Image (spheres, rainbow, N blue to C red):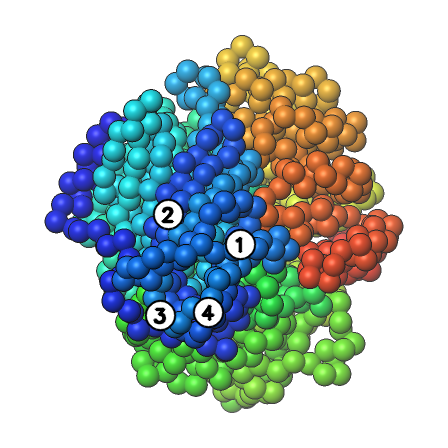
Amino acid sequence: MPRLAIAAFTAALLAGCATAPLAPTTPTAVAPLPPSVTSELPRSARPLHYVISVTPDASALTFTGHEAVTLQVFEPTTTLTLNAAMLEISAATLAPSGGGPAQPLAVALDAERETATFTAPAALAAGEYVLTLDYRGRINTQPSGLFALDYKDKRTGQPARALYTQFEVPDAREFAPMFDEPSYKATFTLSAVVPESQLAVSNMPVAREELLGNGMKRVTFATSPKMSSYLLFFASGDFERLSKRSPSGTEVGIVSVAGTGETARYALDELAELLPYYNDYFGVAYPLPKLDNVTGPGQSQQFGAMENWGAIFSFERSLLYDPRNTSPERLNYIYTAQAHEVAHQWFGDLVTMAWWDDLWLNEGFASWMETKATDHFHPEWFERVGRVNARERAMGLDALSSSHPIVVPIRVASEANDAFDTISYSKGEAILAMFEAYAGEDRWRDGIRRYFAAHAYGNTVTAHFWRAQEPAGAVDIAAVADGFTRQPGVPLLTATSRCEAGSTRLELTQGEFSRDRREEVSRTPRRWRVPVTVRAADGSLHPALVNDRAELTLPGCGPVIVNGGQLGYFRTLYTPAALTALTERMAQLEPVDQLGLFKDNLALAAGAYQPYAPAIEMLAAVSGEANPIVGRAAVESWGGLYGRLVEPADQARMAQIVHATWWPRLEALGFDPKPGEPFPDSNLRAQLLATFGNLADPSVIAEARRRFARLRTDRTALDGPLKTAWLTIIARNANAEEWEFLRALGRTAPDASEKALYYSLLGDAVDPVLAQRSLDLALTDEAGATSRAVLVRSVAAHHPELAFDFAVAHDAAVMSMLDDYSKSDFVPGLLTASTDTASIARLETMREARSENDRTGVNKALASLRERIASTPRIRAEIETWVRARR
C-alpha cells in the first residue's frame, strides 16, 4: 500500500470504534500489588490509563513529552513514586479524576533507583487522580528507550534517520514517567508530533492526524488494551507499509524504510498465516485490530526482535528476505523469529509474567511455539529434529556451576537482562516439549486454552500455568515440573539392559550430569522426576517416570534408545556394549534419534563420563546420505573436533576423514543452489562449504577466491543464498588486500543489512595483524553505530585475548557501542574461545571491580573458561589418539 494511503486506511479500520475517554470518570475497582509479587515501587498506587504526547527532535537527539496518568491511590499518602530514567521533569500537578483544582507537586529524581517521587503539599486521600507532567528526554543511538537508527536511503543513497523504541526490560521509563513494572498494567493513548511527510506507528492504528503547520503533524493512536509498559511502542520515519488481510480477518503489515519493496513480502505472507493458526491453537482470538512488524536497519548484540503488542519490532536482517544476501540459515531465522514474536502476542502480551523471575513464561513458551508453528507450516524443514540442537545448547550451559533455575529470583529490574539467556529460551522450550509429551498433546493444548481464558489481560506466575494444566488431565504436572524449573542442572540416567526370555530388561538409575562439579554431584546429586520415553528394539515407545531408579520390560531383544524421540531433558550413559550396538544400527535409526545420540555422547565424552573414541565412532557412523538436519549437525561437530587439534598432521588426517564421508554429499549438492531444492539441502550445502573452508580444504578456498575476485568487476557476482558462506571463507583466510577489498565493499554497500554483513566479516580474519586492524576500525564511526561492537565480537572468535584486552583498554568506547541488554556480559563473553590460563586472572580482576549485582555475566564466563582450560588437554589427547589410530 502506498505510504500516503496509510492514514486513510487506519481511519477506515477504526470506523465505528470510539477511543477511550481521557480518564475514567468513576473509580475503578483495582487492588494494590500483592506482597507476593516483587516490586521496586511503593504499593500505595497503581496506574489505570496513560495519555502520553511526545515531540521528538531527531536531529538534536532529544524529545519533549506531556503526560496525564490516571491512577488509583489506595491509602492516604503525601507522595507518589513512578519510574523515570534520564528524564528532566519541568512541571507536575495532581487533580481528582472527576474534576477539581490541580495542585502542584514537588519532584525529586533518584538516578540510581530510576524513580521520580512527587510530593503533595498535604496528604492525599485514597481515590482516583490524574497526574500531569511535562518533561524532556534524550534519544539514544543504541537500541534502548527511544532510539535513532541512521542508514542510507535505499532509493537515493543519502543519509537518513528513523526513530524506534525498545522498552524491555526497564526502559519505558526513559520515554515517560511510568509504573514501569510488568504487573502494573494499564491502557495507553499515545500521540506524537512528527514531520508531515513521515509515517508514525504504534501498537494501535492511527485514530486521527492533525496538520500543525511548519511541515509538522500530530498523530494520535487509538487507545490500547490493558498492557504492561514495556510493550508500548512508537516509531516514526520515512516508512512504507506492505499489508494484507490475514485469513482470520486481522489486517497485518510490514513497516520498513522507504525503498524496501518486495523484500518484505516473505515476512508479510508468513505473518498472515501465523495469526489464524495461533487463534485456533490458543482458543483466544488475537484481540487488536491490526498487527504490524516494524523493521529497522542496524542490529543489537542481544536481540533480533521485540514483541510489542500489535507492533513487533525486528531488525532488517531478522525480517527482510533479500535473495541477493539472505543465507539459508538466515531465511530459517526470519521465519522462526517472526513465529516466536507472534506467539508472544499471547504468551507475554495478553498474559504477562508478574515479575521478571518468571520470564520463561514469555520466552520459553514463545520458543516452544515457534518450533510447533514452523513444523506445522513447513514439515519439510524437519524443525522438530533441529530442536535437539537448542536442547544441547541449553544443557551445555546448564551443566556448569554458573547456571541458574528457569524460575530465577530477580531482585531488581536491572538484573533481568541476565535472565534473557539460553536457559530461559532453550531450556524452557526443551522442558515444555517434554511436558507436552508427558501430558499428551490434546490435554496439553486444552490446559493452555484454560490458562488464557483464566488470565487474559492479567499477570501470572509459573504455578498458574500448572494449575491450568492439571484440570485438563496433565496428572501431577506441577510436581514433575518443579524439579526442572526451580533448580538448575541436567539429570543423568545410567542405563543397563539384558535380554531375558525374548524381552529386554532395562534398568535406569538417576544421577546428575555436570562439567565442573563432578565430585560434588557424585556425592549429593540433585533429584528430578524425569519423564522418559524409551524406544524398544522393535521401534515401539514406552513412557516411564524415573525418580531414583526405574525398571522396564520391553518387547524383543536388541539396542534400546532411552530418550526415544529426543523429547527428554536429560543425558543417557549407556554401557560400552549398548553404545556399540546403537552405533552399528545408526543408519537405521530415526533422524531425531541419530542427532540426539551423537550429540549426547559427544557431551558425555567432553564431560569425562566416557572416553571420546566411542562417541566419535558414533559420529562417524552418521552416513554422508543422512537427513540434512542430522548431516548439518554432524559436519558442524566434525569441525568442532578439528578445532581441538593443534598438530598439522592430526589436522590433515581429520580433514581426510571428514572429506571421505562428506565430500560426495557436497558434490551431489553442487557448489551452486538448484532451483526448487529443499530448504534443508540448501542449508546443508552452506554448512559443508563453511566446514571445508575451516578445514582449509584447498579446492573450497580456491573456489571461494575465484568467486570473490569476480566482485572486482561485478558487484552482484556473489549474490544469492551462498553469498555469506563464500565471503566467510574469504574473511577467515583473508590477506591484507582481500581484507581491504571487503572493507571497501562494506563502505559502499547500498543498504544497512549488506553493510553490516561486510563489517561483521572483517573481524573474522585469522591473521592477527588484520584482527588488530578490525579492532582499531571499531573505534571509528565507519561501520555504523550498531555494528561497531560486532567487529569486536568477531575478532574474539579467533583472538579472544586480543579482543578482551582491547575492550578493557577502551572501556568507555566499547560501552558506548552496546545497548543496555549487552553491557553485563559482552566483554567477559569475548573470552568464550580462550584456552589461556591467564584469562582466568583477567576475569577475576574484572569480577572484583564490579558490584555484586553486576557479576552474573562474569561469573558465567569464568565457570565456562575454568572448565574449558581444565578439560582441553584431556579432550585434545583423546581426539588425537582416535585420529592417529585411523591412519
Residue visible at 43% across and 42% down in the picture? 65
Residue visible at 23% across and 43% down in the picture? 207
Tag 1 and tag 4, C-beta contact below 8 Å:
no
Which residue is tagged 4? 123
User: Are there few (<14), some (14-19), or many (20+) residues within 10 Å of tag 3?
Assistant: some
Label 2 or label 1, whichever lies nearer to me, is 1
- How far apart marks 1 and 4 lie (CA) works out to 16 Å
Which residue is tagged 3? 127
Q: Is residue 110 depicted above or below 557 in this figure?
A: above
Which residue is tagged 1? 107
Q: Is residue 543 depicted above or below 185 in this figure?
A: below
- How far apart marks 3 and 1 lie (CA) works out to 21 Å
Q: Which mark is residue 52?
A: 2
- Describe residue 335's horizontal placement relative to residue 757 as left or right: left
The secondary element bearing badge 2 is classed as: strand
Q: Where is residue 331 drawn, in percent x and y?
A: 43, 40
Tag 3 and tag 4, C-beta contact below 8 Å:
no
Residue visible at 44% across and 73% down in the picture? 76
Q: Where is residue 189 drawn, in percent x and y?
A: 31, 50
Q: Where is residue 7 drawn, in percent x and y?
A: 23, 34
In the image, what residue type sits under mark 1? Answer: Val
> Which is nearer the N-term, disc 3 or disc 1?
1
User: Are there few (<14), some (14-19), or many (20+) residues within 10 Å of tag 4?
Assistant: few
User: Are there few (<14), some (14-19), or many (20+) residues within 10 Å of tag 1?
Assistant: some
Label 3 or label 4, whichever lies nearer to me, is 4
In the image, what residue type sits under mark 3? Answer: Gly
Q: Where is residue 667 drawn, in percent x and y?
A: 52, 34
